[in-house]
Amino acid sequence: MANIVNKLFGGSSKSSTPEDEYTELDLTKYEEVLDDEPAETYIRVAELTNLNELTSLKKEVYDGNIVMIDISNIKVDKLLLDRALKDLKEVVLDVHGDIAGIKDDQVLVTPTGIKIDRSKILGGRY
């Protein structure tokens, strides 16, 4: 099971440091809601706690949306994690999208026509 996770997201042997931890930033003063301007693609943020939630997450991808999924709640159950990742991978293959792990607790799933560049931009360079 860990092998599948490593194949999908690459293994990570380094331990996290305090500066690697997720920090919630208050960006509300920079956000502007444009309710009257619909978009073709939305970025949806989700938290996966059980397999029942996979149906709505897969629908989002089939509808052409990008989904950022927090998998921290299911990581302790290796069978559940393996099944969820397998199901998401099948959707990605079906729509010709992409899937990648972000840090240890996030999975990014994209629909048709959107690929994930796995190189980092550092100081304006790749």
Image (cartoon, rainbow, N blue to C red):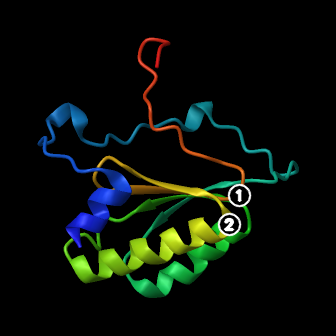
Task: For the residues labelled 1 and 2, say whether their Cβ atoms are less than 8 Å apart.
Answer: yes
| Type of the residue with mark 2 | Val
Crowd band around label 1 with a 10 angstrom C-alpha radius: few (<14), some (14–19), many (20+)? some
Q: Residue 78 got which mark?
A: none
| Type of the residue with mark 1 | Thr
Location of residue 14 by image quarter:
top left
> Which SS class for mark 1?
loop
Reading the image, the residue beneath label 1 is 112
Task: Please name whichever residue, 23 or 126, is drawn nearer the observer in this view of the structure.
Answer: 126
Which residue is pictured at 81% across the width and 54% down the height? Answer: 40
- Name, please, the residue furthest toward the right: 36
Which residue is pictured at 30% across the width and 50% down the height? Answer: 10
Which image quarter is the N terminus in? bottom left
Asked whether residue 55 appears in the rendered view, the answer is: yes
Crowd band around label 2 with a 10 angstrom C-alpha radius: few (<14), some (14–19), many (20+)? some
Q: Position of residue 109 (x, y in %)?
A: 54, 58
Look at the picture and state if 51 lies above or below 124.
Answer: below
| Mark found first going from the N terminus, 1 or 2 | 2
Task: Please name whichever residue, 25 or 80, is drawn nearer the observer in this view of the structure.
Answer: 80
Q: Position of residue 78 (x, y in %)?
A: 22, 77
Asked whether residue 72 appears in the rendered view, the answer is: no
Q: Residue 95 got which mark?
A: 2
- Left or right of 43, for residue 64: right
Look at the picture and state if 17 lies above or below 81.
Answer: above
- Left or right of 46, for residue 30: right
